[in-house]
Protein backbone atom coordinates (compact mmCIF):
# COMPACT_ATOMS: atom_id res chain seq x y z
CA UNK A 1 0.00 0.00 0.00
CA UNK A 2 1.39 3.41 -0.97
CA UNK A 3 2.23 6.05 1.59
CA UNK A 4 -0.39 8.42 0.14
CA UNK A 5 -3.17 5.84 0.52
CA UNK A 6 -3.27 6.00 4.31
CA UNK A 7 -3.27 8.61 7.06
CA UNK A 8 -1.77 8.27 10.51
CA UNK A 9 -4.42 10.24 12.37
CA UNK A 10 -8.15 10.25 12.99
CA UNK A 11 -10.48 13.24 12.74
CA UNK A 12 -13.91 13.63 14.29
CA UNK A 13 -16.19 16.48 15.24
CA UNK A 14 -16.85 17.46 18.85
CA UNK A 15 -19.52 20.12 19.11
CA UNK A 16 -18.48 22.74 16.52
CA UNK A 17 -14.82 21.74 16.39
CA UNK A 18 -12.85 19.22 14.37
CA UNK A 19 -10.53 17.15 16.56
CA UNK A 20 -7.51 15.45 14.99
CA UNK A 21 -5.71 12.84 17.09
CA UNK A 22 -2.50 10.94 16.47
CA UNK A 23 0.24 9.37 18.54
CA UNK A 24 -2.12 7.74 21.04
CA UNK A 25 -2.81 4.09 21.79
CA UNK A 26 -5.59 2.84 19.47
CA UNK A 27 -7.16 0.99 22.40
CA UNK A 28 -7.69 4.23 24.31
CA UNK A 29 -11.38 4.33 25.13
CA UNK A 30 -13.53 7.30 24.26
CA UNK A 31 -14.28 7.72 27.98
CA UNK A 32 -10.62 7.91 28.99
CA UNK A 33 -9.85 10.30 26.14
CA UNK A 34 -12.67 12.60 27.19
CA UNK A 35 -11.74 12.62 30.85
CA UNK A 36 -7.92 12.44 30.68
CA UNK A 37 -7.15 14.37 27.50
CA UNK A 38 -10.04 16.80 27.04
CA UNK A 39 -10.99 17.36 30.67
CA UNK A 40 -14.62 16.46 30.02
CA UNK A 41 -15.51 14.84 33.33
CA UNK A 42 -19.29 14.74 32.86
CA UNK A 43 -19.19 11.21 31.47
CA UNK A 44 -18.63 8.79 34.35
CA UNK A 45 -17.11 5.34 34.68
CA UNK A 46 -19.34 3.02 36.64
CA UNK A 47 -18.87 -0.56 35.45
CA UNK A 48 -16.29 -0.27 32.61
CA UNK A 49 -18.14 -2.99 30.72
CA UNK A 50 -21.10 -1.31 29.03
CA UNK A 51 -23.75 -2.23 31.60
CA UNK A 52 -24.53 0.79 33.76
CA UNK A 53 -24.69 3.56 31.15
CA UNK A 54 -23.05 6.28 33.26
CA UNK A 55 -20.56 6.82 30.42
CA UNK A 56 -23.15 7.10 27.61
CA UNK A 57 -22.29 9.47 24.78
CA UNK A 58 -24.01 10.00 21.44
CA UNK A 59 -22.41 9.52 18.04
CA UNK A 60 -23.96 11.05 14.94
CA UNK A 61 -22.99 9.56 11.60
CA UNK A 62 -24.29 9.08 8.09
CA UNK A 63 -26.06 5.83 7.32
CA UNK A 64 -27.13 5.39 3.71
CA UNK A 65 -27.09 9.14 3.32
CA UNK A 66 -29.27 9.77 6.36
CA UNK A 67 -28.21 11.29 9.67
CA UNK A 68 -28.60 9.04 12.69
CA UNK A 69 -27.81 9.44 16.38
CA UNK A 70 -26.51 6.42 18.30
CA UNK A 71 -26.14 6.16 22.09
CA UNK A 72 -22.99 4.16 22.87
CA UNK A 73 -20.96 3.19 25.92
CA UNK A 74 -17.82 5.32 25.92
CA UNK A 75 -16.11 2.97 28.40
CA UNK A 76 -15.71 0.20 25.80
CA UNK A 77 -15.66 2.22 22.58
CA UNK A 78 -12.16 2.65 21.17
CA UNK A 79 -11.24 6.19 20.14
CA UNK A 80 -10.36 5.45 16.47
CA UNK A 81 -13.95 4.38 15.85
CA UNK A 82 -14.94 8.06 16.11
CA UNK A 83 -13.14 8.84 12.86
CA UNK A 84 -15.42 10.72 10.47
CA UNK A 85 -18.23 11.06 13.00
CA UNK A 86 -19.78 13.69 15.29
CA UNK A 87 -19.49 13.17 19.05
CA UNK A 88 -21.82 14.63 21.67
CA UNK A 89 -21.14 14.50 25.40
CA UNK A 90 -23.24 15.84 28.24
CA UNK A 91 -21.15 19.05 28.07
CA UNK A 92 -22.25 19.47 24.45
CA UNK A 93 -25.89 20.07 25.37
CA UNK A 94 -25.51 23.65 26.54
CA UNK A 95 -27.25 25.88 23.96
CA UNK A 96 -25.67 28.97 25.54
CA UNK A 97 -23.90 29.82 28.82
CA UNK A 98 -26.33 29.40 31.71
CA UNK A 99 -28.93 27.61 29.60
CA UNK A 100 -30.06 24.02 29.55
CA UNK A 101 -31.06 21.76 26.70
CA UNK A 102 -34.79 20.87 26.61
CA UNK A 103 -33.90 17.33 27.72
CA UNK A 104 -31.94 18.65 30.71
CA UNK A 105 -34.59 21.20 31.66
CA UNK A 106 -37.26 18.50 31.64
CA UNK A 107 -35.13 16.36 33.97
CA UNK A 108 -34.63 19.30 36.34
CA UNK A 109 -38.29 20.24 36.46
CA UNK A 110 -39.37 16.62 36.96
CA UNK A 111 -36.90 16.23 39.84
CA UNK A 112 -35.38 13.31 37.92
CA UNK A 113 -31.90 13.35 39.43
CA UNK A 114 -31.02 12.00 42.86
CA UNK A 115 -27.36 11.26 43.60
CA UNK A 116 -26.54 12.48 40.08
CA UNK A 117 -23.81 10.00 39.18
CA UNK A 118 -25.89 8.25 36.52
CA UNK A 119 -27.66 11.41 35.33
CA UNK A 120 -25.27 12.33 32.47
CA UNK A 121 -25.87 8.93 30.91
CA UNK A 122 -29.63 9.30 31.16
CA UNK A 123 -29.36 12.75 29.61
CA UNK A 124 -27.46 11.39 26.63
CA UNK A 125 -29.77 8.42 26.07
CA UNK A 126 -32.76 10.77 26.12
CA UNK A 127 -30.91 13.18 23.81
CA UNK A 128 -30.36 10.38 21.26
CA UNK A 129 -34.05 9.50 21.43
CA UNK A 130 -34.99 13.18 21.13
CA UNK A 131 -32.97 13.47 17.92
CA UNK A 132 -34.27 10.21 16.42
CA UNK A 133 -37.99 10.40 17.34
CA UNK A 134 -40.51 13.24 17.10
CA UNK A 135 -42.57 11.97 20.06
CA UNK A 136 -42.25 9.45 22.87
CA UNK A 137 -44.32 6.76 24.56
CA UNK A 138 -43.56 5.18 27.90
CA UNK A 139 -42.72 1.86 26.22
CA UNK A 140 -40.35 3.55 23.77
CA UNK A 141 -38.58 5.36 26.59
CA UNK A 142 -38.19 2.14 28.54
CA UNK A 143 -36.30 0.71 25.56
CA UNK A 144 -34.30 3.91 25.06
CA UNK A 145 -33.18 3.85 28.72
CA UNK A 146 -32.52 0.09 28.82
CA UNK A 147 -28.78 0.70 29.05
CA UNK A 148 -28.93 3.11 31.97
CA UNK A 149 -29.04 2.04 35.62
CA UNK A 150 -30.18 4.28 38.47
CA UNK A 151 -29.43 2.75 41.84
CA UNK A 152 -31.40 5.50 43.56
CA UNK A 153 -34.53 3.97 41.95
CA UNK A 154 -35.44 7.23 40.26
CA UNK A 155 -36.91 5.82 37.05
CA UNK A 156 -40.44 7.23 37.37
CA UNK A 157 -39.46 10.93 37.18
CA UNK A 158 -36.83 10.17 34.51
CA UNK A 159 -39.48 8.61 32.27
CA UNK A 160 -41.82 11.50 33.04
CA UNK A 161 -39.09 13.88 31.88
CA UNK A 162 -38.78 11.94 28.64
CA UNK A 163 -42.50 12.25 28.05
CA UNK A 164 -42.52 16.04 28.47
CA UNK A 165 -39.13 16.98 26.96
CA UNK A 166 -40.73 17.85 23.62
CA UNK A 167 -42.89 20.48 25.36
CA UNK A 168 -39.67 22.27 26.31
CA UNK A 169 -38.49 22.11 22.71
CA UNK A 170 -41.67 23.84 21.59
CA UNK A 171 -41.02 26.58 24.14
CA UNK A 172 -37.66 27.48 22.56
CA UNK A 173 -38.12 30.73 20.54
CA UNK A 174 -37.82 30.05 16.80
CA UNK A 175 -34.73 32.23 16.27
CA UNK A 176 -32.92 30.32 19.03
CA UNK A 177 -33.65 26.80 17.74
CA UNK A 178 -30.42 25.16 16.68
CA UNK A 179 -29.26 21.81 15.37
CA UNK A 180 -28.71 20.88 19.01
CA UNK A 181 -32.11 21.85 20.42
CA UNK A 182 -34.24 20.90 17.41
CA UNK A 183 -35.96 17.53 17.94
CA UNK A 184 -36.39 14.86 15.27
CA UNK A 185 -38.57 16.12 12.43
CA UNK A 186 -37.21 19.67 12.68
CA UNK A 187 -34.58 20.07 9.92
CA UNK A 188 -32.81 23.05 11.51
CA UNK A 189 -29.06 22.55 11.21
CA UNK A 190 -29.33 19.06 9.79
CA UNK A 191 -28.08 19.92 6.31
CA UNK A 192 -25.01 21.64 7.74
CA UNK A 193 -24.07 18.64 9.87
CA UNK A 194 -24.61 16.28 6.94
CA UNK A 195 -22.28 18.39 4.80
CA UNK A 196 -19.66 18.44 7.53
CA UNK A 197 -19.76 14.66 7.88
CA UNK A 198 -19.70 14.21 4.12
CA UNK A 199 -16.57 16.35 3.98
CA UNK A 200 -14.87 14.08 6.51
CA UNK A 201 -15.96 10.97 4.62
CA UNK A 202 -14.63 12.41 1.34
CA UNK A 203 -11.05 11.70 2.38
CA UNK A 204 -10.17 8.66 0.24
CA UNK A 205 -7.38 7.50 2.54
CA UNK A 206 -7.82 4.70 5.01
CA UNK A 207 -6.52 4.94 8.56
CA UNK A 208 -3.27 3.28 9.66
CA UNK A 209 -2.18 4.10 13.21
CA UNK A 210 0.91 2.98 15.07
CA UNK A 211 1.74 3.47 18.73
CA UNK A 212 4.68 1.57 20.14
CA UNK A 213 4.05 -2.08 19.30
CA UNK A 214 0.35 -1.46 18.60
CA UNK A 215 -1.21 -1.06 15.18
CA UNK A 216 -4.70 -0.08 14.06
CA UNK A 217 -5.98 -0.29 10.49
CA UNK A 218 -9.33 0.86 9.11
CA UNK A 219 -9.43 -0.22 5.46
CA UNK A 220 -12.06 1.11 3.09
CA UNK A 221 -12.15 -1.83 0.67
CA UNK A 222 -12.19 -5.60 0.85
CA UNK A 223 -8.92 -5.63 -1.10
CA UNK A 224 -7.23 -3.53 1.59
CA UNK A 225 -8.70 -5.75 4.29
CA UNK A 226 -7.34 -8.86 2.59
CA UNK A 227 -3.91 -7.25 2.44
CA UNK A 228 -3.87 -6.44 6.14
CA UNK A 229 -5.03 -9.93 7.10
CA UNK A 230 -2.35 -11.47 4.91
CA UNK A 231 0.32 -9.29 6.51
CA UNK A 232 -1.05 -9.71 10.05
CA UNK A 233 -2.85 -13.09 10.22
CA UNK A 234 -3.10 -12.81 14.02
CA UNK A 235 -4.84 -9.43 13.89
CA UNK A 236 -7.99 -8.95 15.95
CA UNK A 237 -10.96 -7.98 13.81
CA UNK A 238 -12.95 -5.13 15.32
CA UNK A 239 -16.54 -4.25 14.47
CA UNK A 240 -18.46 -2.68 17.35
CA UNK A 241 -16.02 -3.42 20.17
CA UNK A 242 -18.71 -4.52 22.63
CA UNK A 243 -16.72 -7.71 23.25
CA UNK A 244 -13.16 -6.65 22.38
CA UNK A 245 -13.57 -3.46 24.42
CA UNK A 246 -13.86 -5.54 27.58
CA UNK A 247 -10.53 -7.19 26.84
CA UNK A 248 -8.99 -3.80 27.52
CA UNK A 249 -11.30 -2.29 30.15
CA UNK A 250 -11.67 -5.41 32.34
CA UNK A 251 -8.86 -7.80 31.40
CA UNK A 252 -6.23 -5.12 30.69
CA UNK A 253 -4.98 -7.04 27.67
CA UNK A 254 -2.53 -5.61 25.17
CA UNK A 255 -3.78 -6.01 21.60
CA UNK A 256 -0.99 -5.78 19.07
CA UNK A 257 -2.99 -5.33 15.86
CA UNK A 258 -6.58 -4.26 15.32
CA UNK A 259 -8.32 -4.21 11.95
CA UNK A 260 -11.62 -2.29 11.89
CA UNK A 261 -14.39 -3.43 9.52
CA UNK A 262 -16.85 -0.54 9.80
CA UNK A 263 -15.52 1.58 6.93
CA UNK A 264 -15.98 -1.09 4.24
CA UNK A 265 -19.23 -0.38 2.41
CA UNK A 266 -19.79 -3.99 1.31
CA UNK A 267 -19.79 -5.13 4.94
CA UNK A 268 -22.44 -2.63 6.09
CA UNK A 269 -25.25 -3.86 3.85
CA UNK A 270 -28.43 -5.84 4.42
CA UNK A 271 -29.62 -7.52 1.23
CA UNK A 272 -32.50 -9.85 0.40
CA UNK A 273 -32.29 -12.17 -2.59
CA UNK A 274 -33.41 -15.66 -3.57
CA UNK A 275 -35.04 -16.35 -0.22
CA UNK A 276 -32.08 -15.25 1.91
CA UNK A 277 -31.32 -12.23 4.08
CA UNK A 278 -27.60 -11.46 3.95
CA UNK A 279 -26.29 -9.50 6.95
CA UNK A 280 -22.84 -7.97 6.44
CA UNK A 281 -20.08 -8.20 9.03
CA UNK A 282 -20.37 -4.52 10.03
CA UNK A 283 -24.19 -4.33 10.22
CA UNK A 284 -25.22 -3.15 13.67
CA UNK A 285 -27.14 -5.51 15.94
CA UNK A 286 -30.00 -3.03 16.12
CA UNK A 287 -30.32 -2.89 12.33
CA UNK A 288 -29.96 -6.66 11.94
CA UNK A 289 -32.57 -7.51 14.55
CA UNK A 290 -34.95 -4.81 13.30
CA UNK A 291 -34.89 -6.45 9.88
CA UNK A 292 -35.22 -9.97 11.34
CA UNK A 293 -38.26 -8.89 13.35
CA UNK A 294 -39.86 -7.47 10.21
CA UNK A 295 -39.76 -10.98 8.75
CA UNK A 296 -40.22 -12.91 12.01
CA UNK A 297 -42.36 -10.77 14.37
CA UNK A 298 -42.19 -13.47 17.09
CA UNK A 299 -38.55 -12.43 17.63
CA UNK A 300 -39.47 -9.02 19.04
CA UNK A 301 -38.82 -9.97 22.65
CA UNK A 302 -35.50 -11.60 21.81
CA UNK A 303 -34.58 -8.38 20.01
CA UNK A 304 -35.39 -6.18 22.98
CA UNK A 305 -33.74 -8.52 25.50
CA UNK A 306 -30.62 -9.30 23.53
CA UNK A 307 -28.82 -6.32 25.10
CA UNK A 308 -29.35 -2.66 25.88
CA UNK A 309 -29.88 -0.18 23.06
CA UNK A 310 -26.35 1.29 23.41
CA UNK A 311 -24.86 -2.19 23.00
CA UNK A 312 -27.10 -2.95 20.02
CA UNK A 313 -26.17 0.45 18.56
CA UNK A 314 -22.47 -0.45 18.56
CA UNK A 315 -22.14 -4.24 18.34
CA UNK A 316 -22.77 -6.39 15.27
CA UNK A 317 -24.63 -9.63 14.66
CA UNK A 318 -21.67 -11.14 12.82
CA UNK A 319 -19.43 -10.25 15.75
CA UNK A 320 -21.79 -12.11 18.06
CA UNK A 321 -21.59 -15.13 15.76
CA UNK A 322 -17.85 -15.01 15.08
CA UNK A 323 -16.66 -14.81 18.68
CA UNK A 324 -17.81 -18.38 19.30
CA UNK A 325 -19.38 -17.79 22.71
CA UNK A 326 -21.42 -20.77 23.94
CA UNK A 327 -24.05 -18.40 25.35
CA UNK A 328 -24.52 -15.90 22.52
CA UNK A 329 -28.26 -15.31 22.15
CA UNK A 330 -28.20 -15.06 18.35
CA UNK A 331 -26.78 -18.48 17.60
CA UNK A 332 -29.63 -20.78 18.75
CA UNK A 333 -32.04 -18.77 16.62
CA UNK A 334 -29.74 -18.85 13.60
CA UNK A 335 -29.08 -22.57 14.02
CA UNK A 336 -32.80 -23.29 14.22
CA UNK A 337 -33.32 -21.35 10.99
CA UNK A 338 -30.42 -23.16 9.25
CA UNK A 339 -28.44 -19.96 8.74
CA UNK A 340 -25.13 -20.02 6.89
CA UNK A 341 -21.93 -17.99 7.18
CA UNK A 342 -19.96 -16.60 4.26
CA UNK A 343 -16.22 -16.85 4.95
CA UNK A 344 -13.69 -14.82 2.98
CA UNK A 345 -9.94 -15.03 2.54
CA UNK A 346 -8.44 -12.72 -0.06
CA UNK A 347 -10.61 -12.99 -3.18
CA UNK A 348 -11.98 -16.40 -2.26
CA UNK A 349 -15.22 -17.01 -0.41
CA UNK A 350 -16.85 -20.15 0.88
CA UNK A 351 -20.24 -20.76 2.43
CA UNK A 352 -20.68 -22.94 5.48
CA UNK A 353 -23.71 -24.00 7.48
CA UNK A 354 -23.52 -22.30 10.85
CA UNK A 355 -23.69 -25.64 12.67
CA UNK A 356 -20.39 -26.61 10.98
CA UNK A 357 -18.73 -23.35 11.98
CA UNK A 358 -18.32 -24.15 15.68
CA UNK A 359 -15.71 -26.81 16.40
CA UNK A 360 -15.19 -26.50 20.16
CA UNK A 361 -15.18 -24.03 23.01
CA UNK A 362 -14.45 -20.67 21.31
CA UNK A 363 -13.03 -22.58 18.35
CA UNK A 364 -14.34 -22.01 14.84
CA UNK A 365 -13.66 -23.21 11.31
CA UNK A 366 -11.94 -19.93 10.40
CA UNK A 367 -8.56 -20.38 8.77
CA UNK A 368 -5.63 -17.98 9.22
CA UNK A 369 -6.39 -14.73 7.41
CA UNK A 370 -10.07 -15.67 6.93
CA UNK A 371 -13.02 -13.76 8.33
CA UNK A 372 -16.82 -13.92 8.43
CA UNK A 373 -18.03 -11.65 5.66
CA UNK A 374 -21.76 -12.18 6.25
CA UNK A 375 -24.43 -14.28 7.88
CA UNK A 376 -27.14 -15.64 5.58
CA UNK A 377 -30.57 -16.15 7.15
CA UNK A 378 -33.41 -17.96 5.33
CA UNK A 379 -36.47 -15.79 4.86
CA UNK A 380 -39.84 -17.09 6.13
CA UNK A 381 -41.57 -19.90 4.27
CA UNK A 382 -45.14 -21.09 4.59
CA UNK A 383 -45.88 -23.73 7.16
CA UNK A 384 -42.96 -23.11 9.52
CA UNK A 385 -43.42 -22.09 13.15
CA UNK A 386 -40.52 -20.38 14.94
CA UNK A 387 -39.89 -19.32 18.51
CA UNK A 388 -36.84 -18.30 20.54
CA UNK A 389 -36.69 -18.02 24.32
CA UNK A 390 -34.14 -16.46 26.65
CA UNK A 391 -33.95 -17.48 30.31
CA UNK A 392 -31.80 -15.35 32.62
CA UNK A 393 -31.75 -14.18 36.23
CA UNK A 394 -32.75 -10.66 35.22
CA UNK A 395 -35.31 -10.02 32.50
CA UNK A 396 -33.11 -7.45 30.77
CA UNK A 397 -29.40 -6.67 30.61
CA UNK A 398 -28.33 -10.18 31.58
CA UNK A 399 -26.46 -13.15 30.17
CA UNK A 400 -28.56 -16.20 29.36
CA UNK A 401 -28.56 -19.26 31.56
CA UNK A 402 -30.29 -21.04 28.68
CA UNK A 403 -31.39 -19.74 25.31
CA UNK A 404 -33.45 -22.05 23.13
CA UNK A 405 -34.82 -21.76 19.60
CA UNK A 406 -37.23 -24.06 17.76
CA UNK A 407 -38.48 -24.29 14.19
CA UNK A 408 -41.05 -26.87 13.10
CA UNK A 409 -43.03 -27.66 9.96
CA UNK A 410 -46.11 -29.89 10.19
CA UNK A 411 -47.95 -31.98 7.60
CA UNK A 412 -51.28 -33.48 8.56
CA UNK A 413 -50.48 -33.03 12.22
CA UNK A 414 -47.12 -34.79 12.00
CA UNK A 415 -43.62 -33.31 12.21
CA UNK A 416 -42.12 -33.11 8.72
CA UNK A 417 -39.19 -30.85 9.66
CA UNK A 418 -37.79 -29.90 13.05
CA UNK A 419 -34.70 -27.99 14.15
CA UNK A 420 -33.93 -26.94 17.70
CA UNK A 421 -30.80 -25.41 19.18
CA UNK A 422 -29.61 -24.21 22.56
CA UNK A 423 -27.05 -21.90 24.07
CA UNK A 424 -25.75 -22.45 27.59
CA UNK A 425 -26.14 -26.23 27.36
CA UNK A 426 -22.74 -27.14 25.93
CA UNK A 427 -19.32 -25.75 25.09
CA UNK A 428 -20.75 -24.40 21.83
CA UNK A 429 -24.19 -23.34 20.64
CA UNK A 430 -25.57 -26.64 19.37
CA UNK A 431 -28.52 -28.40 17.82
CA UNK A 432 -30.32 -31.21 19.62
CA UNK A 433 -29.93 -33.78 16.85
CA UNK A 434 -31.11 -36.83 18.82
CA UNK A 435 -34.18 -35.02 20.11
CA UNK A 436 -35.01 -33.86 16.59
CA UNK A 437 -34.83 -37.49 15.40
CA UNK A 438 -37.23 -38.55 18.14
CA UNK A 439 -39.81 -36.00 16.95
CA UNK A 440 -39.36 -36.26 13.18
CA UNK A 441 -42.32 -37.96 11.41
CA UNK A 442 -44.16 -38.28 14.74
CA UNK A 443 -47.50 -36.71 15.69
CA UNK A 444 -47.16 -33.20 17.10
CA UNK A 445 -48.82 -34.12 20.36
CA UNK A 446 -48.14 -34.26 24.07
CA UNK A 447 -46.93 -37.87 24.07
CA UNK A 448 -44.30 -37.25 21.39
CA UNK A 449 -43.11 -34.06 23.05
CA UNK A 450 -42.84 -35.76 26.45
CA UNK A 451 -40.64 -38.42 24.89
CA UNK A 452 -38.53 -35.75 23.19
CA UNK A 453 -38.10 -33.85 26.43
CA UNK A 454 -36.43 -36.88 27.97
CA UNK A 455 -34.27 -37.34 24.87
CA UNK A 456 -32.57 -34.00 25.49
CA UNK A 457 -30.33 -35.79 28.01
CA UNK A 458 -28.81 -37.67 25.07
CA UNK A 459 -27.87 -34.40 23.38
CA UNK A 460 -26.53 -32.36 26.29
CA UNK A 461 -24.65 -32.72 29.57
CA UNK A 462 -24.71 -29.11 30.83
CA UNK A 463 -22.34 -27.72 33.42
CA UNK A 464 -23.10 -25.94 36.68
CA UNK A 465 -21.78 -22.41 37.10
CA UNK A 466 -22.72 -19.09 38.71
CA UNK A 467 -25.66 -18.60 36.36
CA UNK A 468 -27.36 -21.96 36.81
CA UNK A 469 -26.89 -25.56 37.86
CA UNK A 470 -26.75 -28.44 35.40
CA UNK A 471 -30.07 -29.79 36.72
CA UNK A 472 -31.74 -26.40 36.31
CA UNK A 473 -30.46 -26.00 32.75
CA UNK A 474 -31.75 -29.41 31.69
CA UNK A 475 -35.13 -28.79 33.28
CA UNK A 476 -35.40 -25.40 31.61
CA UNK A 477 -34.46 -26.81 28.19
CA UNK A 478 -37.15 -29.47 28.54
CA UNK A 479 -39.72 -26.93 29.63
CA UNK A 480 -38.89 -24.64 26.70
CA UNK A 481 -39.56 -27.49 24.29
CA UNK A 482 -42.88 -28.08 26.04
CA UNK A 483 -43.66 -24.39 25.87
CA UNK A 484 -42.92 -24.33 22.16
CA UNK A 485 -45.28 -27.24 21.62
CA UNK A 486 -48.07 -25.59 23.64
CA UNK A 487 -47.72 -22.36 21.67
CA UNK A 488 -47.80 -24.09 18.29
CA UNK A 489 -50.34 -26.85 19.01
CA UNK A 490 -53.91 -26.76 17.74
CA UNK A 491 -55.43 -25.05 19.60
CA UNK A 492 -52.53 -23.03 21.00
CA UNK A 493 -52.23 -22.72 24.77
CA UNK A 494 -51.54 -19.44 26.55
CA UNK A 495 -48.21 -19.92 28.34
CA UNK A 496 -47.61 -16.56 30.01
CA UNK A 497 -49.24 -13.71 31.83
CA UNK A 498 -48.64 -11.26 28.99
CA UNK A 499 -49.55 -11.28 25.33
CA UNK A 500 -45.96 -11.64 24.23
CA UNK A 501 -45.39 -14.75 22.15
CA UNK A 502 -41.75 -15.27 23.18
CA UNK A 503 -39.64 -14.84 26.28
CA UNK A 504 -42.67 -14.31 28.54
Image (cartoon, grey):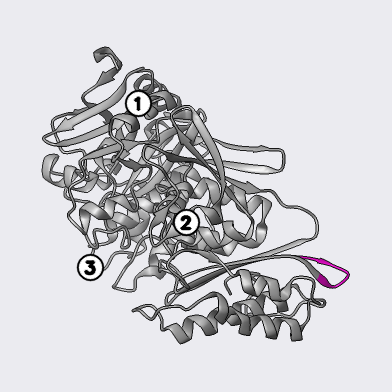
Q: Position of residue 292 (x, y in %)?
A: 61, 51
| Quadrant that contains the N terminus | top left
- Mark 3: give few (<14), some (14-19) or many (20+) Cα within 10 Å: few
Residue at (33, 64) in percent of width and height: 112
Residue on which disc 2 sits: 358
Q: CA distance from mark 1 to mark 3?
A: 51 Å
Magenta highlight on residue 413: yes
Residue on which disc 1 sits: 227
Residue at (72, 74) in percent of width and height: 439
Residue on which disc 3 sits: 115
Residue 47 makes an appearance in the image: yes
| Secondary element type, mark 1 | helix
Of labels 2 and 3, earlier in sequence is 3
Label 2 or label 3, whichever lies nearer to me, is 2
Height in image: 395 above or below 352? below
Q: Which residues are magenta?
A: 409-414
Q: Is residue 157 left or right of residue 352?
A: left
Q: CA distance from mark 1 to mark 2?
A: 26 Å
Q: CA distance from mark 2 to mark 3?
A: 46 Å
Of labels 1 and 3, earlier in sequence is 3
| Secondary element type, mark 2 | strand
- Foreground residue among 248 and 79: 248
- Foreground residue among 40 and 438: 438
| Secondary element type, mark 3 | loop
Amino acid sequence: MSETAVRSSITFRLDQEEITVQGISPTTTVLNFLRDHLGRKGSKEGCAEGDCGACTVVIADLHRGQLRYRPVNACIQFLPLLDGKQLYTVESLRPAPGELHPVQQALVDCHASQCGFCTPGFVMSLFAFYKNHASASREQLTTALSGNLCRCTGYRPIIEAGLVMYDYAQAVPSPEISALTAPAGNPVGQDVLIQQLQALAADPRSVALAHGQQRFFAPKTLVELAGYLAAYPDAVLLAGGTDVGLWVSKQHRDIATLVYLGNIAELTTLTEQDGWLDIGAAVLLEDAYTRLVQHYPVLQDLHSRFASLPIRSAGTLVGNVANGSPIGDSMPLLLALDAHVVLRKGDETRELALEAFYLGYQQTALQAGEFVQAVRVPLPSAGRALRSYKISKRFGQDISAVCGAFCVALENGRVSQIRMAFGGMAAIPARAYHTEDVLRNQPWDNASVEQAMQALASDFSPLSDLRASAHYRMQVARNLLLKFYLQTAEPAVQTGVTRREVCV
